[in-house]
Image: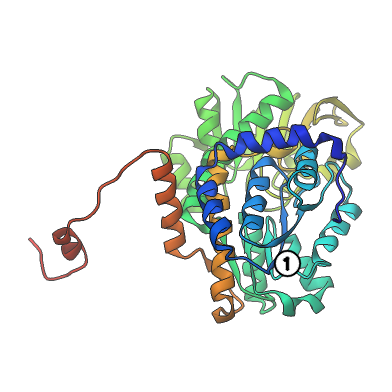
């Protein structure tokens, strides 16, 4: 079996981690049991570019149980849990190409290793697998039935490809499933981002001015959790509706140039580049802490910091100090990469349970229906979304009401009124 991981001797620790997380992912376990019986993915090759964590491990285990041949690479150089990668190879017989801290060259070499296996289904977190295939491996497109995308940034990239008429095959936007973005993005990103900040800095959040750039579902989650920790939250936005929503939710809203003057902690969650730039750095107070919870490391202009700082040093795990020409010091968590994975462990299994259940069921759907789909980005079918929610409620021991025949008739008709 071909693989490239840091150290196979870490596998026992990784297996324990995977098993612990699996205990908190009941929806995926239920799907794995069915997949094991029915083998709906039999004979198919699945190439996945995802964060190599214990949650992801349970997804790829499920896909393998469904009969697929699975190959996994990392979607971020700092998100790989090396012990998990080792366990997937040693204990579960799954090919993994991922090493925490890998440079750009090795990162893309690993992506090509997965593409070398001629996948029939691609699973992406950020669309690097699709874009690399389209730009450099067009000869493989004919093998692909379809793909899925896990994150907002990736969906934006793929919709842009669709708009330009170059999307190579149909993609299911798992990120847009209600059981993904309403829970994973809000509760998962909210909690894991705060977790990453605390692990990297060990500071008190209560009383701090906490600036959140971007008020999408991820930004809402970060703002909510920061407020819950006692921080004074400020939101910066470019979207008028989201800015109004943030204000109505009780947060101060202002441009980044104003927030830069008062903020103690800054978190970017926008999916765009240079959200915190030269002007903001120059306006910041001494001792400001910055981190990014968006997918790519472009939201904080770290290139400016690298080129203009008088000095730089690593002072804690995944925390770098930059001394600016003015004498001020600013601190950057996780090299500006996804801080919840660079300095913590990512989302809890309970929320990834629903996200990855959508991934597994979307793979099954593509195999059954991919040949009927156009080269477009599709929403997760409602029946899959609701199935995931129903399984989750059942596994949590929660019952809900059902419509009576009279209610069902009334809600679907127009001829009954006052």
Nearest the eye: 150 or 44: 44
Q: Is residue 372 above or below residue 345?
A: below
Q: Is residue 27 above or below residue 173?
A: above
| SS assignment at label 1 | helix
Within 10 angstroms of label 1, few (less than 14), some, or many (20 or more) residues? many
Does residue 327 appear in the picture of this structure? no
Q: Look at 68% across and 59% down and name the residue there.
A: 124
Q: Is residue 134 above or below residue 197?
A: below
The answer to whether residue 57 is seen in the rendering is yes
How many numbered discs?
1
Q: Nearer the viewer, residue 23 or 169?
A: 23
On the image, the x and y values in percent for residue 310 come to: 92, 31
Percent position (x, y) of residue 292?
70, 41
The residue sitting at 31% across, 43% down in the picture is 399
Q: Quadrant of residue 396?
A: top left
Judged left or right of residue 146, residue 409 is: left
**Relative depth, front residue between 316 and 210:** 316
Specify how the rendered protein is coloured: rainbow
Residue found farthest to the front: 37
Q: Quadrant of the N terminus?
A: bottom right
* Residue at horizontal 58 percent and vertical 70 percent from the top: 366
Q: Is residue 315 left or right of residue 176?
A: right
The C terminus, quarter of image: bottom left
Image location of residue 371, percent across then percent down:
59, 80
Compared across the picture, whether 224 is left or right of 331 comes to: left
Q: Nearer the viewer, residue 145 or 219?
A: 145
- Residue 308 spot, x, y in % from top left: 89, 39
Find disc 1 in the rendering and name its residue: 130
């Amino acid at each position: 079996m071909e693989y490239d991981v840091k150290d196979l001797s870490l596998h026992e620790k990784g297996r324990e981690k995977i098993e612990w997380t699996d205990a908190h992912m009941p929806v995926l376990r239920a799907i794995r049991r069915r997949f094991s019986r029915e083998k709906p993915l039999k004979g198919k090759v699945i190439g996945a570019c995802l964060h190599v964590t214990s949650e992801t491990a349970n997804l790829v285990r499920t896909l393998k149980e469904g009969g697929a041949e699975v190959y996994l690479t990392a979607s971020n150089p700092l998100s790989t849990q090396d012990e998990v990668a080792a366990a997937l190879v040693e204990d579960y017989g799954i090919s993994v190409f991922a090493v925490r801290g890998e440079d750009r060259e090795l990162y893309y070499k690993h992506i090509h290793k997965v593409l070398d296996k001629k996948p029939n289904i691609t699973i992406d977190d950020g669309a690097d697998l699709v874009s690399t295939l389209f730009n450099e491996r067009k000869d493989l497109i004919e093998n692909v039935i379809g793909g899925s995308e896990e994150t907002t940034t990736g969906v934006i990239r793929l919709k842009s490809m669709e708009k330009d008429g170059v999307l190579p095959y149909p993609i299911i936007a798992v990120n847009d499933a209600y059981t993904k973005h309403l829970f994973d993005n809000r509760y998962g990103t909210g909690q894991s981002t705060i977790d990453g900040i605390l692990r990297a800095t060990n500071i008190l959040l209560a009383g701090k001015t906490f600036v959140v750039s971007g008020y999408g579902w991820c930004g809402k989650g970060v703002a909510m959790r920061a407020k819950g920790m006692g921080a004074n939250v400020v939101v910066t936005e470019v979207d008028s509706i989201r800015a109004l929503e943030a204000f109505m939710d009780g947060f101060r809203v202002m441009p980044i140039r104003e927030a830069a003057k008062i903020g103690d902690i800054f978190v970017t969650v926008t999916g765009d580049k240079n959200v915190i730039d030269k002007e903001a750095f120059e306006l910041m107070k001494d001792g400001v802490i910055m981190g990014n919870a968006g997918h790519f490391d472009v939201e904080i202009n770290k290139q400016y910091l690298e080129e203009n700082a008088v000095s730089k040093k690593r002072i804690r795990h995944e925390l770098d100090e930059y001394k600016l020409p003015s004498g001020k010091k600013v601190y950057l968590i996780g090299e500006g990469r996804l801080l919840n994975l660079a300095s913590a462990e990512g989302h809890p299994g309970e929320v990834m349970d629903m996200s990855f259940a959508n991934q597994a069921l979307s793979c099954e759907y593509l195999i059954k229906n991919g040949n009927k789909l156009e080269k477009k980005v599709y929403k997760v079918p409602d029946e899959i979304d609701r199935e995931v929610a129903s399984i989750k409620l059942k596994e949590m021991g929660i019952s809900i009401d059902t419509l009576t025949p009279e209610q069902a008739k009334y809600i679907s008709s127009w001829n009954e009124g006052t």
